[in-house]
Image: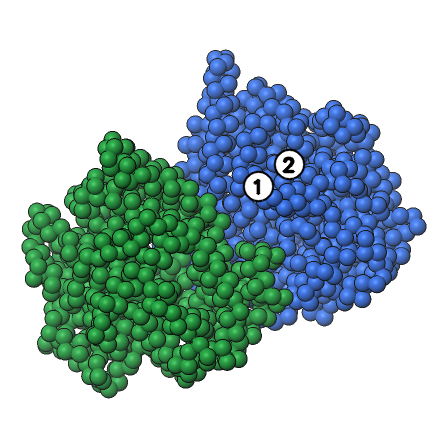
Chain colours: A blue, B green
């Protein structure tokens, strides 16, 4: 683990000052270190370059990134970003996940339920407005005042153009800045092409987060409006040539979440109870779902995306836990905290203005520990991955919240957020009662286990029922029917109150308890934590200026780097794999078995084609599907993973070992042409 | 968590000096602090008292404790200590776990497969012989020399009386003492009575390690020899009267394992990777087994004991993890270590003799981390809970090891250990191929996941197979047939090598790798750790004398205390529950549903009967079934659990909150008489 430790020492000090030596940073487009890049790589990243890339960079509401790659709204992303969509379009008879999907004509392109594509069109600073609203407030008052200000900014920011735009206030530097991001949104996104799962995810979970890798993890969707493909003159140019080792490359995408600015005490909470408890839950649910999937081919099909999501998250969080569990790691962070605190203490005026937010943060951790599981089970992660519960809660809460003034609502139900929520609730997609039973039963049984059988909360949720019997009742909900959902959404609170659907009744009966624990958590944890974080951010700006980048928040960022392998315990890992390696690695046994088309393709494709490659760009989950862009702004790949060392990147970036993994456009082009016979698609991409 | 922290400070300092203020300690019978007990409770625990209790205290090879309670070899233990036996005696038609077991006559009492009962008959000190043998040796040489010496002592200790005695060298004080314990053994143990699971384990996993509690967790087995019940004039007298609050009580049993003498660095390893990885494995296997159990009543029946074992261990280890994850806990331990080190440093001669075993131990932890998973998956926990794998490995290794001199063998195959192993291998018990598939597949898939697909070890175990396909091949082994096992056991290495059983072939093909990782682990971890532990023990003896008790090692111990409730976050928990509470707590839904006999019993039993009770005796897993003994030496209950706070007792005892949980003999008597109509059994117990 030495490699991470050394890195952490470098990074923790660099984060505040200047990360120029490492290819580090998830930079916002309005604060990109172009000068550093010019010096280090000789590449000119000017406003025009940035605008071009920004205009083609897509955020998908499924939690992924993507890019426009033709003038006809064609969007490149990962296979695993449309796995859910492909499953939703499948039936017991046709499995687009297993067998892949290829629209023969435009008319065959299929709507991805619940998916929205968003392109950033403007950034403005609203820090003053937000911080003034919450100034001097504490606890839940702080949270409410801040959230009300945000709701208002988002609403007024998009007034009159809500149909095509989404306004979102993005929190940066853990509350050091608030920026209004305006997105052009597209809510009709259709699946165009996806390879077979075996090809996209060759090596499966065992190879996930590893390299060398042989995954054709790409897919295409297309933006539609008014039933027609959207014209997208601003798109990235498709390059079917792989970049060279050492070549500078950029990643434009939406890294989901990093915790590089947290205090050592907050990291200890992650290490000591938040990550361990989450991982234990994932593990058991994973076990239940694996066995469920083994019961029949149909069970395997319907559980596919849920199980993949859990295994992927499990592996990522497990990597994070391992990083934090190495004792010197947090020690180094504590040292960096102390360093900053000492600098502040040396300046009486600053010291007076900042106070001691580290000490406040330290104190909060006991409440966080006490409330972590009750808050998680009854509110933050209630229902876990149950689609039915998601519908029921959204319907009940939307009905209640819409009766309130915008600024008084729970933030996920403010005017600026309702449109996407409505789409997610109303779009038709299959619901699987057997799978719902597994997930709901698991949730309720862990709720009882973790809160204890005698807790008031357990009694509210379970009454005298067993988790198994109650889950069976709830899984019988009819909310899988989109017509019923529409009726309840449109009918508002009266319709909700009149509903006899078991899950609507259940949410109605438990919602007060859920809101209660949320209120308590905001009062004792969120409020004081966020308030302290604002103070720490101010301290950082005062001492280090704004030369640092903010933590990831699933908003558009640009990272720079180069094509590079690394050294793993003395072994050199080369940055490229080639098609030839695929047949070498195949064993004929899942998940190392080849799809029939690739079994047959061995003589057809150019085996020297670069398949996957690694770069030292700073990325994290949420970057999946991000375009890998060369100096000219051409797309040369799609990021789909990081190596196992990159998982510690949640807390610190070490450019000696952290690597992003991309599938090359060269491999995609060769595969589309030689294996899948997608001549039209290749022509659209390459003009040939 | 304050309550544990304060305790830990007290305990860590007390452990070395004198634990007299707390009711702390798992004392050996040859070093019981009678004077302290006399002073504190006014009870005289003399040699006669100790001999009487020791002669009636039983260790069960299933990992439990028990006691002889009548002159006819009748043994009281817990229901959960015979759950495995009851399941082994069941069939798809008759389920003795669910429905209970009651032998109508002596002839109906049924052999518990693999179970041996052992009664301690003598203790002698062999420390010098063992430590001289390994003096000056390091790494694996140290382990081998020590183990060879132990093998020789155990063999000569029982020469000529092997049929009825078992000699075992018990390691005390982490290697500070080695004592030869001689046991009278009984290998024909028969099930006499067990209540329904619903009654014994009312509240199930949710109530496990909790109190108030309403579990009739008892059973009776009987010792046989030559086909007849063993005459046991030395037995505990049955008292059907519950003890009073504050009354002094004793627990004579076999606590399995505590880690109170470990260094802070060793505790950090437990916290940072050993416990987390173990818990994650338990969680996922638990999930797979829960879903497996839901597939049919028969699956639920055959997985019952395995699932219970996993859930019970999970909850216990989870409690341990929580204790260690509270940062001040290990900090306090480090402080206590430093205190002892300072005392040694102050004495140049002692310092010279002891060296710095703490620094050595600290250094070992990196190797321990690197080897933990490979060693676990390929050797220490290979096959996990697969009965078939257990048979295959035992058969293969016993055949190989028996060709070697006694001192050259793996310790589990030395002459003194072979008899019980042979019994476990040859006794007939059902094997369930579907369950084997689940366990073996899980083991192999986690082996690949944790070692990575490309590791040499993974290739040895899996070849090009998938875990799923390989497990199916291995689960088809015929080793479930006791006749085949006998043939292979008796046939020795020639028979093993000639066998075409898939699991025998598999173990033959992988055993070199397993032995290799074991050798490496002994060289880099076990050897240096145990050697350092011996030095630390010497240091403790030098500074604190022998007034402390050793860590638990599943050998006979006596703890003292009193009937006592505790205060849980300001709430007083009373030490007793009564029959009346059972009907109050019953919801009608599993696991809070009553067995039919108890539904009908509401008017029949005395509702004021003390059901379960708590005491502040110092116990831990392995103490299950231990007799709770009053000052007169009468049995007044059977320990079956600890409260949730007691789980931290693995590392430190806090008598303000650590509580043992027992089922009262009063409840057992009333239940046998009024609910089960067991007049004969009651007569045997009470003479009435």
Residue B301, image x, y percentages: 42, 74
Tell me which chain the residue with mark 2 is part of: A
Residue A419 in the image, given as x and y percentages of width and height? 69, 44
In the image: residue B610, left or right of residue A650:
left
Q: Position of residue B77 (x, y in %)?
A: 24, 68
Frontmost residue, A76 versus A584: A584
Whether residue A554 is visible, yes or no, is no
Asked whether A405 or B342 is in front, the reply is B342
User: Is residue B5 among what the camera can see?
Assistant: yes
Q: Nearer the viewer, residue A594 or B247?
A: A594
- Side (left or right) of B26 relative to A194: left
Badge 1: how crowded within 10 Å, few (<14), some, or many (20+)?
Answer: many
Chain letter belonging to callout 1: A
Residue occupying the point 21% across, 81% down? B225
Q: Which residue is mark 1?
A: A648
The numbered mark at residue A655 is: 2
């Amino acid at each position: 683990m030495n490699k991470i430790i050394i890195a952490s020492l470098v990074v923790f000090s660099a984060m505040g000052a200047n990360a120029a030596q490492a290819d580090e940073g998830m930079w916002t487009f309005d604060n990109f270190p172009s000068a550093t890049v010019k010096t280090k790589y000789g590449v000119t990243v000017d406003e025009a370059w940035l605008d071009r890339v920004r205009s083609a960079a897509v955020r998908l509401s499924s939690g992924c990134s993507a890019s426009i790659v033709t003038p006809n709204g064609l969007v490149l992303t990962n296979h695993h970003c449309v796995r859910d969509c492909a499953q939703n379009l499948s039936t017991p008879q046709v499995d687009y996940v297993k067998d892949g999907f290829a629209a023969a004509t435009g008319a065959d392109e299929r709507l991805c339920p619940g998916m929205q594509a968003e392109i950033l069109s403007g950034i403005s600073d609203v820090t003053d407005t937000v911080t003034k609203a919450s100034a001097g407030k504490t606890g839940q008052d702080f949270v409410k005042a801040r959230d009300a200000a945000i709701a208002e900014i988002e609403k007024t920011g998009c007034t009159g153009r809500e149909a095509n735009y989404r306004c979102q206030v993005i929190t940066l530097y853990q509350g050091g800045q608030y920026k209004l991001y305006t997105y052009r949104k597209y809510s009709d996104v259709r699946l165009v092409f996806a390879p077979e799962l075996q090809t996209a995810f060759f090596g499966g979970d065992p190879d996930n987060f590893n390299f060398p890798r042989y995954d054709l993890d790409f897919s295409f969707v297309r933006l539609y409006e008014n039933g027609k493909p959207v014209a997208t003159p601003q798109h990235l140019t498709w390059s079917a040539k792989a970049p060279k080792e050492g070549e500078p490359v950029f990643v434009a995408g939406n890294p989901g979440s990093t915790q590089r600015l947290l205090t050592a005490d907050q990291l200890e909470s992650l290490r000591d109870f938040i990550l361990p408890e989450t991982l234990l839950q994932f593990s058991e649910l994973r076990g239940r779902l694996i066995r469920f999937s083994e019961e029949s081919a149909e069970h395997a099909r319907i559980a596919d995306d849920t199980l993949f999501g859990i295994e992927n998250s499990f592996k990522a969080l497990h990597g994070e836990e391992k990083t934090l569990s190495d004792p010197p790691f947090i020690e180094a962070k504590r040292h960096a905290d102390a360093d900053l605190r000492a600098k502040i203490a040396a300046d009486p005026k600053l010291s007076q203005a900042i106070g001691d937010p580290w000490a406040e943060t330290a104190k909060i951790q006991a409440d966080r520990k006490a409330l972590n599981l009750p808050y998680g089970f009854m509110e933050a992660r209630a229902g876990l991955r149950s689609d039915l519960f998601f519908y029921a809660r959204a319907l009940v809460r939307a009905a209640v919240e819409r009766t309130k003034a915008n600024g008084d609502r729970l933030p996920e139900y403010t005017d600026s957020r309702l449109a996407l929520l409505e789409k997610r609730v109303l779009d038709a997609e299959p619901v699987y009662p057997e799978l719902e039973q597994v997930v709901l039963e698991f949730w309720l049984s862990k709720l009882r286990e973790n809160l204890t059988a005698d807790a008031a909360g357990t009694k509210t949720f379970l009454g005298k029922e067993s988790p198994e019997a109650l889950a069976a009742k709830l899984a019988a909900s009819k909310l899988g029917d989109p017509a019923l959902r529409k009726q309840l959404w449109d009918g508002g609170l009266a319709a909700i109150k009149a509903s006899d659907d078991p899950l609507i009744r259940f949410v109605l009966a438990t919602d007060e308890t859920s809101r209660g624990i949320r209120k308590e958590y905001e009062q004792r944890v969120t409020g004081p934590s966020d308030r302290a974080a604002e103070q720490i951010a101010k301290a950082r700006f005062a001492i280090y200026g704004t030369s640092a980048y903010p933590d990831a928040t699933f908003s558009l960022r640009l990272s720079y780097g180069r094509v590079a392998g690394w050294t793993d315990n003395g072994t050199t890992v080369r940055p490229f794999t080639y098609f030839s390696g695929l047949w070498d690695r195949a064993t004929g046994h899942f998940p190392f078995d080849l799809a029939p088309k690739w079994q047959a393709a061995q003589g057809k494709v150019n085996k020297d084609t670069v398949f996957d490659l690694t770069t030292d760009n700073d990325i994290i989950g949420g970057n999946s599907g991000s375009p890998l862009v060369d100096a000219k702004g051409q797309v040369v790949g799609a990021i789909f993973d990081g190596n196992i060392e990159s998982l510690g990147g949640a807390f610190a970036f070490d450019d000696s070992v952290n690597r992003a993994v991309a599938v090359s456009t060269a491999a995609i082009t060769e595969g589309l042409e030689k294996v899948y016979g997608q001549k039209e698609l290749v022509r659209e991409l390459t003009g040939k």
